[in-house]
Each structure stands twice: as structure tokens, then as C-alpha cells.
């Protein structure tokens, strides 16, 4: 280990328990929830194996009035939930780490779609995600009963084996709804002054300590700033006062910014590493208890600085631990260069928002530990050595080369361009996406360590070249190109726009003249990011989309609000709910998505950001020549970078196998059916 990093491996006492080091995987969603306990346990166990001294679960509901269906969440509603959660605690303990559990009540945020019981909140409050439902106001006896739920869940968590039990007052959930004057206008002892609004939080900490504090640490997760200015909790105002008031009560402070999750887990496009520090740095000066916070920390130097400068006692991480579950071990073993750094793309957040299990652009093995038996650091050696040619060095090609190389194949990589990276080379030049180059850099670096891999940039391959090469197997990772015919997500326009440009042209340096119109019928980052870039270069930009908002899919990566704000502030004209009809020499015609009523907009340059088509023209000739060939990534199915990496990894894992790998599913036992 580099002696400069030794401070990261000091043990830290948290109340009655001691963390073996300062690496703290803060609670984060996996989408696995109560339905998939074995997959959840395997995922958390992997983090512990990778060296995280504390590993926490995702949110764990304490009562059916807090049901976040269809999103994956855990439950400790009764004793029958204990055994499933014990799997996770055991998997974490197997590697000597502490197991934390985030007890949760969503208040007005819980829509109770599955349980169908009325929601509860400090005041009568429309449910935030499931209109037109309204949460009812809790009266005094509700509060008493609620405190019992937290207490009972804490006792169950202790029986399941957890070492750190959370009181969760972050992300706008119930105790925070009491805390914030924005959501609490009660006139009783739980409303009014800050002391009154903090009463429930204080009681929950005291109750939890009383129930389990003899052997378990009690952590508080608190949003110290909800980014709503003086009307809400702020780190200079009431956030600070709450910490002052309760400073020594919990055993650990886990602090962040909220209210919505999107502020806490902001993407790299809108926040740098350590972006929460200005909000949370004050906490340590007010308490003697250990403090943890997050900020997409991936650099050991930044981590050491966080500790030495007294910002926090732990290195809190959710996304960096997803991208590389073995980050701590790599630092400990002096292999910091091998850390697979999170790129801050928020594909993991999108999985949560889409209510599917976790995925990650950088780590294709996340959430596959149990389902497919994938280990992020280990991969089976091929039964017999084979010569493989991979064509194309985008994310898919690079991932395939690395995984096949680790499996012991004799791999050759041929790339047409002079540099490796494929689409990453272009896309990482867009505003805010510089971190995306890490997808290329980490893979190229790790490939460089393998003697059995040869890399040839500047090598455009034809079918004849490939056949002549004589590999046992050929992998086409030749990517995709943007469409020119306007066919996008909204339908089959199939019109002819001979003078329109596509993103590939812009990256190739095409001249952009006059007022630019970007027609976005793809809805992810490209249309919005190009609008931002061209506007920053001084062009007048009009952004048109058939959807209601700009880059609408980025709502799932928690970025949409930031994207639209940035475009509007840059002076980009946004024309929502319109489809493209026709391009004339200096204008375009658009039709309202509902009425069909047509309008015209001046247009010097039209850029179509619609669908993509695979670059797979080598495939058919190779098949015809009898070459053993497979397609992966965008060449098979144009999609996200995360999907390209996953596709490549899956191919490499299954390569040489006789049968399709089985996707294991957790099924309830069927009794008395047969
Ligand atoms: P993916 O996301 O699936 O990895 P990319 O578009 O990022 O796809 O990468 C595809 C790569 O394949 C590009 O770098 C491109 O230059 C390369 N490529 C395409 N056709 C050929 C070819 N005939 N020979 C060598 N490389 C090619
Ligand atoms: Fe980081 Fe993106 Fe992976 Fe999330 S999906 S952990 S943001 S690399």
C-alpha cells in the first residue's frame, strides 16, 4: 500500500461497534428489494469482499404505510422478514465488515400502490408520485404508533444481525417532512418552532437507541440542505441548528443534500467530485460523533484529503462502490491504477427510477452476482485456448477484449480509427461528459497489462481481411451510426431530409450555418448536449422535440430538470410537442403532436438526433464465407454505453460454453401444487 493512503485503513469506532476501515458504502437502491433477498445479499457481500468496512442496505420499510412499489425496497414489517435480511447481514459479516440497515418511512412520498393503505404525513399532503392520492395528517396517537414501528423494526434488524441501524431523515422522507417548514404546518408539539419540528426525529433516535443501542450503533441520515433556499432546511440555517440540537444523540451522522434524490446523486454532467462538501463540511465542527458523506469519490488522494482536512471521518460512497466494488482493496494492495472509476452517468439511478434491478455503465457484473454468478474481479479461464479477432474498439469491443483476454484467449483487436474508444471519443467531448472517457481509459489500461492481447489502431478491416486473418472466432463490435431519415422513437417518419446533418457529421467537423434546429426524437443526452455545445459556440439554437420536455429520458437519470434549466439559461429556444414535417432552404415546418397544426421556424442547419442503425455490413459476408462470427454492442443493438458494455461482457462470459447461461430467478416455494 502507498503509505500516503494508510489513513484510509484506520479503524473507526461507531458507538458500540468498530468499522475496520474508513470505506463506508452508504445506503443505495439496488432494485432487488424484498422480492430478491439472495441477489441482494450477494451484491452486498461482494462490496464487503472488496474491502468496504461498512456496507449498508437500501431503504427498508418499517410498515405497510410506507410502500414504494413498483420500486425495489426492503421490508421489516413483521418477524417473517428477518430471515431474508439475515442473509445480507451474514454475507457482509463473512468478510469482516459492519452491516448497516436503512430503516425507512416515506410519509407522503410513499404511494402505497401495492399495500393500498392510506399514506401518512405531518399534514394533509398530495402523494408526491401517485396522484390523485393524498396522505392523511398524523394525529398524536398516529405518532405514538409510528414510533413503535421504528422501534419494532430496529429490534428485528438487530435480530437479523445488523450492526448499524438507521433513523432516516433524508431525501424528503417522513421524519424530514416533519423537520422542514415547507411540509410541516402543524399547530401541536410537533409543528411550529424548529425544536417542535425536530421532536419526532429526536424521539426516533432515542427510541432506536433504547431498543438496540446496547449492541448496535444508531446512525442518522439527514439532509442538511434541501436546496429550496430560506423557506426550507439550509446548511447555514436550520440544517445547522438541527445538528447543533442533536449533535451527540446518534452514534453517527450520515449527511447529504436533498430534498429530491437527484440533488444528492447528481450526475457528473452537473457536479464535480466532492460537490457536497460546501454543504456538509460544517457538521464535524459541531459533533464528536463520526461523520460520513458522499460525493462520487474515486481518487485516493481526494479521499485522504477529505479525512485530513476534517471534512468527514469516512469515505462515503454509493456510485463509486457500484462501479468498483473492489475499490478499497485495490488501494490497500497498491493497485489504485486499477480502480474502475464511476463516470457519474447515473444509469444506476435510471435503473432505480425504472423499477428494474441495478445496472452500471462501468461495472457490468453489478446485480449479477447471484443471478449469473458473476464476480467483478474473477472470470473463468477458457477450457481451450482460442484465437479471437475483435473488430472495433468502442466500449463493447474494449470490454470484450478485456474479458476474453482475462479468460486466456489469444485476442487481437483491430480498430479503424487512430485512437481507441469509439463513440466515447466523441461523446466525452460534449459539455460535462469528460468523465465518460474513463470507460475507454480503464479498459485500455487493463488490456495493456495482458500479454495475450494485441491491439492495432488504424486498422480498417474488410471481410476479406478478416477471413484471411484466420481467427477461431470473430467478434464484430463495429458500433452504429445515426439515421438520416428522421425515424426516431416517436414513429416512422421515413421522410427525406437531404440537407440535414446527424451527430456524426457534427463530430466530424461539419460546418454549421445560421440558426440551428436540433430535432430530438431520441430523448437521451445527445440532443440536449449538442444544443448546449452549439449554443456555447455562439450559434442561435432551437431545440424541437415531440416530447413535452427536453432530453425527456434523462428524467430517469435525475438530470432532466438540470438539462432544461441549462438550455433555457443559455437562450436555447425549446419547442416541445412538435414533430418535423419538412425542410425548405431556410426554414423547417413542424406539426403539433396533438392537433397537427403546422408552424414554421427559421433554420440554417437542421440536425437530426433520432434513431441509430447498426454498422454490421461485415456480418453477412463473413457468415457467407463460413467464418465463426458474433455481433456485440451497438453493432447488434444500438443502445446505451451501459448496454454495449454489458452485451460484450455477457458474450465473453458465455464464449466457449455449450449452453446458454441460465438467468436464475428467485421464486417463492410452491406448496401443494402437484
Ligand atoms: P459500441 O458502443 O458498440 O462499442 P462504437 O460505435 O463505440 O460501438 O465503436 C465501434 C468502433 O468500431 C468504432 O471505433 C469504429 O471505428 C470501429 N469500426 C467500425 N467498422 C470497423 C472496421 N471495418 N474495421 C475496424 N474498426 C471498425
Ligand atoms: Fe457511476 Fe454510471 Fe455506474 Fe452509476 S451507472 S455507478 S453513475 S458509472
Image (cartoon, rainbow, N blue to C red):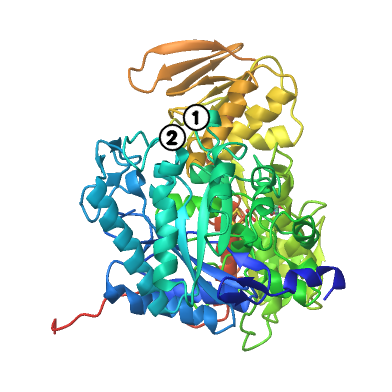
**Does the closest atom of ligand 2 sit within 8 Å of the Cβ of label 2?**
no
Which quadrant of the figure shows ligand 1?
Answer: bottom right
Q: Of 225 and 451, which appears nearest the observer?
A: 225
Q: Quadrant of residue 86?
A: bottom left
* x then y, percent, for residue 626: 59, 71
* x then y, percent, for residue 147: 32, 58
Dots 2, 1 in contact, CB < 8 A: yes
**Residue 39 visible in this rendered orientation of the protein:** yes
Q: Of 658 and 560, which appears nearest the observer?
A: 560
Residue positioned 81% across, 58% down in the render:
457
Would you name the residue on which mark 1 appears? 231
* x then y, percent, for residue 171: 47, 47
* x then y, percent, for residue 342: 66, 57
Q: Of 120 and 402, which appears nearest the observer?
A: 120
Q: Of 269 and 653, which appears nearest the observer?
A: 269
Assign the N terminus to one quadrant of the image.
bottom right
Image position of 37 (left or right of 532): left
Would you name the residue on which mark 2 appears? 181
Amino acid at each position: 500500500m502507498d503509505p500516503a493512503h494508510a489513513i484510509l485503513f484506520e479503524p473507526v469506532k461507531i458507538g458500540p461497534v468498530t468499522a475496520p476501515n474508513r470505506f463506508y458504502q452508504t445506503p443505495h437502491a439496488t432494485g432487488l428489494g424484498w422480492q430478491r433477498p439472495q441477489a441482494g445479499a450477494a451484491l452486498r457481500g461482494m462490496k464487503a469482499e472488496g474491502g468496504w468496512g461498512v456496507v449498508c442496505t437500501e431503504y427498508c420499510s418499517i410498515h405497510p404505510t410506507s410502500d414504494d412499489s413498483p420500486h425495489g425496497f426492503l421490508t421489516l414489517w413483521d418477524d417473517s422478514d428477518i430471515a431474508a435480511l439475515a442473509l445480507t447481514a451474514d454475507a457482509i459479516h463473512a468478510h469482516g465488515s459492519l452491516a448497516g440497515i436503512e430503516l425507512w418511512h416515506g410519509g407522503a412520498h410513499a404511494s402505497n400502490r401495492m399495500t393500498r393503505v392510506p399514506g401518512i404525513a405531518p399534514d394533509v399532503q398530495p402523494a408526491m408520485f401517485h396522484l390523485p392520492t393524498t396522505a392523511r395528517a398524523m394525529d398524536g396517537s398516529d405518532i405514538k404508533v409510528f414510533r413503535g414501528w421504528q422501534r419494532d423494526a430496529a429490534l428485528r434488524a438487530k435480530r437479523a444481525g445488523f450492526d448499524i441501524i438507521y433513523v432516516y431523515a433524508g431525501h424528503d422522507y417522513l421524519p424530514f417532512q416533519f423537520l422542514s417548514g415547507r411540509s410541516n404546518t402543524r399547530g401541536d408539539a410537533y409543528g411550529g418552532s424548529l425544536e417542535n419540528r425536530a421532536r419526532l426525529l429526536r424521539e426516533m433516535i432515542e427510541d432506536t437507541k433504547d431498543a438496540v443501542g446496547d449492541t448496535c450503533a444508531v446512525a442518522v441520515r439527514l439532509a442538511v440542505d434541501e436546496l429550496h433556499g430560506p423557506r426550507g432546511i439550509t446548511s447555514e440555517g436550520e440544517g445547522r441548528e438541527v445538528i447543533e440540537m442533536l449533535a451527540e444523540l446518534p452514534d453517527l451522522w450520515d449527511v447529504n443534500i436533498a430534498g429530491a434524490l437527484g440533488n444528492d446523486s447528481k450526475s457528473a454532467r452537473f457536479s464535480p467530485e466532492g460537490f457536497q462538501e460546501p454543504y456538509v463540511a460544517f457538521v464535524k465542527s459541531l459533533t464528536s460523533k463520526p461523520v460520513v458523506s458522499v460525493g462520487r469519490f474515486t481518487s485516493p488522494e481526494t479521499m485522504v484529503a477529505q479525512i485530513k482536512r476534517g471534512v468527514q471521518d469516512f469515505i462515503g460512497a454509493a456510485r463509486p462502490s457500484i462501479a468498483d466494488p473492489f475499490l478499497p482493496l485495490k488501494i490497500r494492495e497498491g493497485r489504485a491504477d486499477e480502480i474502475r472509476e464511476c463516470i457519474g452517468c447515473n444509469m444506476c439511478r435510471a435503473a432505480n427510477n425504472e423499477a428494474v434491478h441495478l445496472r452500471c455503465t462501468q461495472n457490468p457484473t453489478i446485480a449479477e452476482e447471484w443471478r449469473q454468478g458473476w464476480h467483478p474481479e474473477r472470470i473463468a479461464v477458457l477450457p481451450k485456448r482460442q484465437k479471437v479477432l475483435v473488430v472495433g474498439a468502442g466500449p463493447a469491443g474494449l470490454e470484450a477484449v478485456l474479458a476474453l483476454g482475462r479468460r486466456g484467449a489469444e485476442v487481437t483487436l483491430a480498430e479503424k480509427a487512430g485512437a481507441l474508444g469509439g463513440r466515447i471519443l466523441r461523446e466525452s467531448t460534449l459539455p460535462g461528459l469528460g468523465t465518460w472517457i474513463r470507460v475507454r481509459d480503464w479498459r485500455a489500461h487493463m488490456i495493456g497489462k495482458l500479454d495475450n492481447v494485441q491491439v492495432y489502431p488504424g486498422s480498417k478491416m474488410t471481410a476479406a481481411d478478416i477471413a484471411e486473418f484466420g481467427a477461431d472466432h470473430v467478434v464484430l463490435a463495429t458500433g452504429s451510426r445515426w439515421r438520416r431519415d428522421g425515424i426516431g422513437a416517436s414513429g416512422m417518419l421515413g421522410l427525406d431530409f437531404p440537407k440535414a446533418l446527424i451527430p456524426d457529421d457534427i463530430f466530424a467537423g461539419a460546418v454549421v450555418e445560421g440558426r440551428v434546429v436540433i430535432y430530438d426524437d431520441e430523448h437521451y443526452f445527445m440532443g440536449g448536449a449538442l444544443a448546449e455545445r452549439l449554443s456555447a459556440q455562439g450559434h442561435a439554437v432551437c431545440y424541437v422535440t415531440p416530447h413535452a420536455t427536453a432530453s425527456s429520458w434523462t428524467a430517469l437519470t435525475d438530470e432532466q430538470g438540470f438539462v432544461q434549466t441549462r438550455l433555457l439559461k443559455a437562450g436555447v429556444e425549446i419547442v416541445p410537442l412538435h414533430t418535423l414535417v419538412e425542410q425548405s432552404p431556410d426554414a423547417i415546418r413542424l406539426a403539433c403532436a396533438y392537433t397537427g397544426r403546422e408552424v414554421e421556424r427559421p433554420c440554417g442547419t437542421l440536425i437530426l438526433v433520432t434513431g441509430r442503425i447498426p454498422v454490421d455490413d461485415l456480418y453477412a459476408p463473413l457468415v457467407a464465407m463460413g467464418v465463426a462470427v458474433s455481433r456485440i454492442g451497438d453493432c447488434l443493438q444500438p443502445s446505451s454505453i451501459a448496454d454495449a458494455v454489458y452485451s460484450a461482457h455477457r458474450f465473453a462470459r458465455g464464449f466457449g460454453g455449450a449452453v446458454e447461461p441460465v438467468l436464475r430467478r428467485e421464486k417463492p416455494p410452491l406448496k401443494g401444487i402437484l
